[in-house]
Image (spheres, helix red, strand yellow):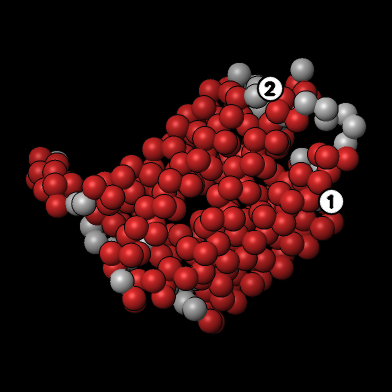
Amino acid sequence: MRDASQNFIRMWENLSFLQRLMLLGIVPPFITCLIGIVLFLKKRLDDTQKFVFMLAICSTTANFINTYLWYYQMSNAHISNVYVLFGTLLIVQIYRQAGTLSKQFSLIISGAFGIFWVVNAFFIQGFYEHNSYTATVYCILPICFASVCFYKMLINSEMENVLSFPIFWINVGMMVYFATSIFIFTFSDYLLKYSLALNVHIWFVHSIFLGLFFVFLSIGLCIRSPKLA
């Protein structure tokens, strides 16, 4: 344990300022996860918020494993690939529970993405490589869902004060994060080949928007749903 602590301290000292901030990117999803646990125990979460809570758990777990593998200089691309699969399925359920997607359409989207993920991971890009194709779709789907959700909120006469609805804040987080991440997930492999320093800066920007994503999700969890009022 002592040797591991000393190795971590030495590793931390060798990191640049940006790399240290990137490593701290695990904190926002962890905080969102803690908030979700408290609210879940108090039965303050509706069905949509429960799936947001599960997304935070999934992200926190993936981040911890990725950080562990990164610390021991092991590849963590396959962990990110698995997270993309479960993250997408959870996001589909979030928008299904929010009423943006029908049950039938959500099943079609989940099934189609699942098949695409398997084919890409095992027959095209490889399970242990960064799967940029599925990651791109992982970004596109929430942007489409969020756009439809915003439109439905605009035409819904019962949602006069949208700020008081959890889905509004969840939707803002989805739109902000995935609209900025689509470029990173699509071109990260090419950026790494072009310049390691540029790649670090790009992923630092990603960490910032990831933090904002979970800030908005935390707000969406904390606002009491009208369904539970």
Q: Which residue occupies the foreground of this view, 2 or 52? A: 52
- Residue 51 in which image quadrant: top right
Residue sitting farthest toward the bottom: 123
Q: Is residue 4 visible?
A: no
Q: Nearer the viewer, mark 2 or mark 1?
A: 2
Horizontal side of residue 18 vs 28, given as left or right:
left
Q: Which residue position holds label 1?
A: 102
Element type where label 2 sits in the image = loop
Please report the residue visible at 66 percent of the width from the left and 27 percent of the height from the top.
45
Please report the residue visible at 34 percent of the width from the left and 58 percent of the height from the top.
201
User: Residue 11, position in %: x, y?
Assistant: 16, 51
Image height of 60 relative to 86, above or below: above
Image height of 186 relative to 122, above or below: above
The residue type indicated by label 1 comes to Ser
Position of the N terminus by quadrant: top left
Q: Which residue occupies the foreground of this view, 88 or 141? A: 141
The mark found on residue 54 in the picture is none
Please report the residue visible at 82 percent of the width from the left and 58 percent of the height from the top.
105
Q: Which residue position holds label 2?
A: 224
Q: Which residue occupies the foreground of this view, 229 or 180? A: 180
User: Residue 24, position in %: x, y?
Assistant: 33, 42
